[in-house]
Image (cartoon, rainbow, N blue to C red):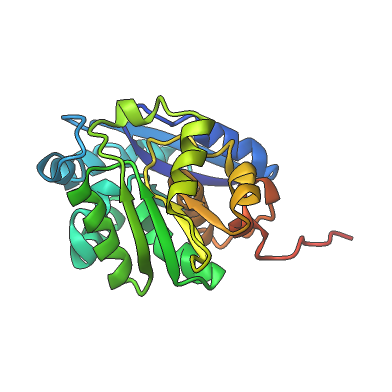
Amino acid sequence: MTALGFLYPGHSAEDDYPRIEQLLGSDIRLDLVHTDIGEDAHRVDALLEMGSPERLTAGVEALRMSGAEAVVWACTSGSFVYGWEGAHDQVRGLARAAGLPTSSTSFAFVYAAKELGVRRVAVGATYPDDVAALFADFLRAGGVEPAVVRASGIITAAEVGTWGRDEVLALARSVDGPDIEAVLLPDTALHTAGHLADLEKELGKPVLTANQVTVWEALRLADRRVNAPALGALFTREPLVQVG
């Protein structure tokens, strides 16, 4: 059994994680600890506070006790808002507190894009314009080129969590184009785990979503590879292990 730990901000789309755990269909357990988000607002000052060391380290001990082999801060905006270097500092502080390999959803997007060999991407963001622009800056710092960035202007994670399949597909379609290698949907408050197969079938290319890449990143940190096609192209990069 591989246990993976996630610090998830508040309550929006956390039910993606048991769904992903089921779709992985393996000896993997996904453990969530909910962090206190303070004010629910996609606003830079609120996001900086949400990702502060005090709020993150408060949940670390519970994950350590659960037997987690790796910890990921399951929040995109609460990590990229610090910038490339600041997000590294955030992860390093979390690693010191946890005594475990750590990362965040923002880095997961960059590493997942590199795993798929894609560079020119489109971003369908739920955030306001200024916050979406910070994510684009973060991607560029990581060597990924956001050729298209669309901001939906939603202020709260609570509202994002109410979006269903139709809204998610419409957002992805709105940023896609023939020269786009992959579409990124960067909000862990957005329910996407049940829509990945539909998204990739609709667009005919890889789609990377926040909760999907967050789990993939935790698996990467724990040195696990799982073939789970229902979770998109990102989870079909390695051949199935033949047992016999």
Can you see residue 87? yes
- Residue at the right extreme? 244
Which residue shows up at 67% across the image and 59% down it?
A: 236
Q: Is residue 235 above or below residue 23?
A: below
The residue under the point 30% across, 32% down is 157
Residue for point 50% across, 69% down: 179
Determine if residue 99 is in view: no
Q: Position of residue 183 (x, y in %)?
A: 48, 56
In the rendered image, the vertical position of residue 104 relative to residue 230, given as above or below: below
Identify whether 18 is placed above or below 102.
Answer: above
Task: Determine the image quadrant of residue 224.
Answer: bottom right
Quadrant housing the N terminus: top right
Residue 164 position, x and y percent, is 49, 28
Query: Between 150 and 61, which is closer to the camera in this rendering?
Result: 150
Which x, y percent locates residue 79? 26, 52
Q: Position of residue 17 (x, y in %)?
A: 51, 36
Q: Quadrant of the C terminus?
A: bottom right
Residue located at (24% from left, 64% from top)? 137
State the residue in front, 112 or 186. Answer: 186
